[in-house]
Image (tube, grey):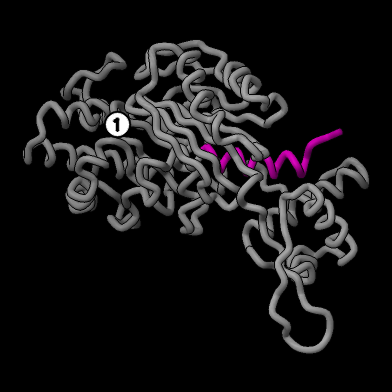
Amino acid sequence: MRRFTESTPTGGTRQLRRWHRARILQAIRAEAGISRLRLARKLGLSPSAVTEAVAELLAEGLVQERPLPPSGQGRPSVALELEGQRHLALAWEIDVDRMAVALLNLRGEVRAHVVLPPAPARLEEALAQLQAATAPYLQGVRVLAAGLSLPGLLEPEAGHLTLAPNLGWADLPLLERFRAALTALGLNKTLAVVENEANAAAYGLYALAGLALEHCVYLSLGVGVGGGVVVGRRVYHGARFHAGEVGHIPLDPAGPPCRCGKRGCAEAFLSYRRWQASPSRARLNEMAERLAQLLAVVLATLDPEQVFLGGPLVEAIGETLLKAAQKRLPRYALSVHTPEQVALSPLGREAALLGIGALAADSFVEQMAYEVE
């Protein structure tokens, strides 16, 4: 995501007003109950610019006023806060073990949440089910933006899904079909974004976990093993949009076969199905050893503040696996990296769903700042 507060746009007075409005909305998101005077001081704007932008946000219904207790003589102050019930971001998740829908406000608070069965065989069928599950919650709601996450290789800006092997999908115009599903709900003008599920989860941990992180990695341990990377508060995609494919880092050339055709990949050792096939102490110890090796590579390569673990394997044996891997990590990691840099995802199973909602919400604010009429 572009940090719009750091670069004043060009394009004239109207563009500058939109930029001010977006900065003010972002500041209200960050500090509920902020006053107009504090906004002006915090953002370096004139009181008149703040007053004008706030009036537009109030008229649009995105923010609301709340009287503050009197602090002496003079006119009582008024606090500004987000309207958090009717102006929402829509999040859809498609995964091997489930699908899900959520509606979140701009603070990241969930206003609706529905879990559906695993994805059907075809993308169109999955979107139709998500569409049907969403419809009852749209009465009286303005959807500001919508996001869709799934496990696969995709190009977020072009919206093209190259491959989702665990879903059995390949070479699909994902964003186009997502927009068609939104149009069927009457959301044809709604901003739409798509993202890989691990990237969405990493973004959710950056945006919603309350940890003040700028650099973090999320490892999804499920049917496959994937990674999401946030660098400098942005999802890092890489030159070919394949960054984070840590499941195919080779750990042992003599190891078990991987579905990619090679042997000994991290995914071949750390998939949830492998644990299900042989849930034993010996298998746990082996997985912890391989996870420690993988973590050492991730820490040395990306140097994140934190690595989070999530996914079905973590749901099953997360705490035990984490402690065993942390114990082994010093054997492989550089001395500057510590076991405490690895933790279970505080968002749990909902990281990708909440993350794609947060990404959609932030995309709405960014669009507000830079859209050209």
- Indicate the position of residue 215 as horizontal and vertical percent values: 49, 49
Q: Main secondary structure of the magenta part?
A: helix
Q: What residue lies at 58% left-to-right and 21% top-to-bottom?
A: 178
Q: Residue furthest right?
A: 13
Q: Residue furthest bottom?
A: 72
Q: Is residue 196 in view from this perspective?
A: no
| Label 1 crowd bin: few (<14), some (14–19), many (20+), radius 10 Å | many
Q: Tell me, yes or no, whether the highlighted magenta stretch contains residue 105.
A: no
Left or right of 210 in this view: 226: left
Q: What residue lies at 46% left-to-right and 40% top-to-bottom?
A: 113
- Which quadrant: the C terminus? top right
Q: What residue lies at 56% left-to-right and 48% top-to-bottom?
A: 232
Span of residues in magenta: 356-373
- Indicate the position of residue 115 as horizontal and vertical percent values: 40, 33
Left or right of 284 in this view: 186: right
- Indicate the position of residue 368 as horizontal and vertical percent values: 75, 42
Up the image or down, 26 lies above or below 46; here it is above
- Helix, strand or loop at label 1? It is loop
Give whichever of 140, 43 is nearer the camera. 140
- Which quadrant: the N terminus? top right
Mark 1 belongs to which amino acid? Gly
Number of numbered discs visible in the structure rendering? 1
Up the image or down, 209 lies above or below 224; here it is below
Give whichever of 125, 243 is nearer the camera. 125
Give whichever of 47, 206 is nearer the camera. 47
Q: Is residue 137 in view from this perspective?
A: yes
Q: What residue lies at 87% left-to-right and 65% top-to-bottom?
A: 46
- Indicate the position of residue 108 as horizontal and vertical percent values: 54, 49
Q: Picture quarter containing residue 73?
A: bottom right
Up the image or down, 177 lies above or below 279; here it is above
Q: Tell me, yes or no, whether the highlighted magenta stretch contains residue 365.
A: yes
Residue highlighted by disc 1: 222
